[in-house]
Image (cartoon, helix red, strand yellow):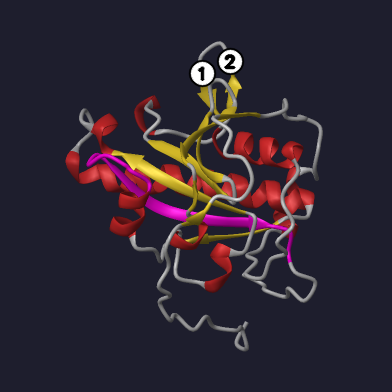
Amino acid sequence: MNDLKRLPYQPLKALPRPAVGTSEQLIALPEPDRTSGLPLMGALWQRKSTRTFEEQALPPTLLSELLWAADGVNRPQGGGRTAPTPHGENVIDVYAALPSGLYRYDPVHHYLQLKLAEDVRSLTGYQDFVGMAPLDLIYVVNHGRMQDMPPKLRETFAAASAGAMAQNVYLYCASTGLGTVIRGWLNRQQLAEHMSLNEDEVPILSQTVGYPAKDENWLL
């Protein structure tokens, strides 16, 4: 690992771009296939970070399963999710930045709801690949749902929840041959403004997803 390539952190100036194609108000997602992908141990062996991506769009089936893996409902009777939550409170919302627009994932109904008919992928971080990969996930903490939690623990709880979702995505990507990388280096204020979030909502992490480029050799 001593010769691991390091990222040149050079901030890029970015603005939202016009949406590509039709910005549907709702994107219905197929039912996830519970039998797809590698077994857990196999996915753990394959888990890594990717930083070069093809621009090829993800098919609806993979997009559906990826979002369900991140924060889908896996216990319908009680509304339990695939990722743990503090005190059973779902404090993180998952947004999907696609070429056709910015969408919020609705785990209960398993669909994407349009938030903004703009391509905001390039605003989800400073690295050059964020605007080219087909999908950037944005994890947004809603502080309004944390009022009953001890103030000193809110940041820890939110980070733990977002981290669990991100790892779910890592394992899903590893099991299906997709590439992904989690990113904490982003302009939170700028991104929140362009996402039209309220004062209680703050982007905490971003995660790029796509097909890895053929020359991809990252080991993290």
On the image, the x and y values in percent for residue 113 come to 51, 31
On the image, the x and y values in percent for residue 200 come to 24, 39
Q: Is residue 213 above or below residue 41?
A: below
Quadrant of image for the N terminus: bottom right
- The span picked out in magenta is 195-212
Amino acid type of the residue that numbered disc 1 sits on in the rendered structure: Gly
Residue 206 belongs to the span the image colors magenta = yes
Q: Is residue 95 above or below residue 48?
A: above
202 and 57: which is toward the camera: 57
Sort mark 1 into few (<14), some (14-19) or many (20+) by Cα contacts within 10 Å: few
On the image, the x and y values in percent for residue 20 come to 61, 50
Q: Is residue 18 left or right of residue 180?
A: left
The residue beneath circle 1 is 79
Q: Is residue 186 above or below residue 11?
A: above
Sort mark 2 into few (<14), some (14-19) or many (20+) by Cα contacts within 10 Å: few
Question: What's the residue at 26%, 38% (across, down)?
Answer: 143
- Disc 2 secondary structure class: loop
Q: Is residue 219 left or right of residue 208?
A: right
The residue beneath circle 2 is 76
- Mark 2–mark 1 contact, CB under 8 Å? yes
